[in-house]
Amino acid sequence: MSLPIKIAPSILSADFGHLNEEIASVDEHVDFIHVDVMDGHFVPNLTLGAPVVKCLKSRVPIECHLMITNPEKYVEDFAKAGAAMITIHVEATGERTEEVLEQIRALGVKPSLSLNPETPVEIIEPYLDLVDMVLVMSVHPGFGGQSFIAEVLSKVTRIHELKPELDICMDGGINVETGRQSVEAGANVLVAGSYIFGAQDRVRAIEALRA
């Protein structure tokens, strides 16, 4: 089963002083906008919170990737701020994962689950029927512009074998080459930050990822 390729620019690589202008430069050509939320605790970086998400304007849905400790305390804030999808990390929720995914769904938002490069697929297998997307980190979360970790491709293949109709997202170090490798492994959603926002022609860069 081959799902359509979806492209999600990560605003982590955009100009934070002009976020809505940056989003407007790409949102006619992509499927959703990826917002990295970092708390300086779960990952060694700080980005933005729900008040900023509330101010974002986009023609396409906004997905908030919560790289934070205790995400259950904040999912309602992000839902109210306009997130159409909320991604949580299984490493942050542990035994509470099912409960938090159900909390997100109850808020009228699509739940998504992420796993870090060192986390085995077996950890998320019990939750595949509860999510709209699985996000596989192909870098260590925290900073943009990192190199792609090819070893995670086998995780994508395994998830696709288990649930071929599920959106599988690859996030980190995505360009034309690593995007192609990800799609061949079974991913159909590509998050790209520096590759898109650092391109001279952003629309051409997006089209190249879809090719």
Image (cartoon, rainbow, N blue to C red):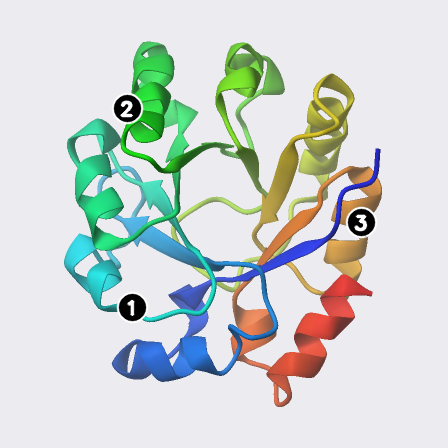
Question: Which is closer to the viewer, label 3 or label 2?
Answer: 2
Q: Which residue is mark 1?
A: 56
Q: Amino acid at mark 3?
A: Gln
Q: Nearer the viewer, residue 139 or 136?
A: 136
Q: Amino acid at mark 1?
A: Leu
Q: Which residue is mark 2?
A: 103
- Residue 184 at least partly seen: yes
Quadrant into which the C terminus falls: bottom right
- At horizontal 39% and vertical 24% (from top left) the residue drawn is 91
Q: Which residue is mark 3?
A: 181
- Label 3 environment density (alpha carbons within 10 Å; few <14, some 14–19, many ≥20): some
Q: Position of residue 80 (x, y in %)?
A: 20, 47
Secondary structure type for disc 1: loop
Q: Nearer the viewer, residue 97 or 59?
A: 59
On screen, residue 22 versus residue 18, left or right, reads right
Of the residues under marks 1 and 2, which one precedes in the sequence?
1
Q: Position of residue 44 (x, y in %)?
A: 29, 48
Locate residue 23: give its quadrant.
Answer: bottom left
- Label 1 environment density (alpha carbons within 10 Å; few <14, some 14–19, many ≥20): some
Q: Position of residue 26 (x, y in %)?
A: 53, 77
- At horizontal 40% and vertical 69% (from top left) the residue drawn is 58
Residue 4: which disc?
Answer: none
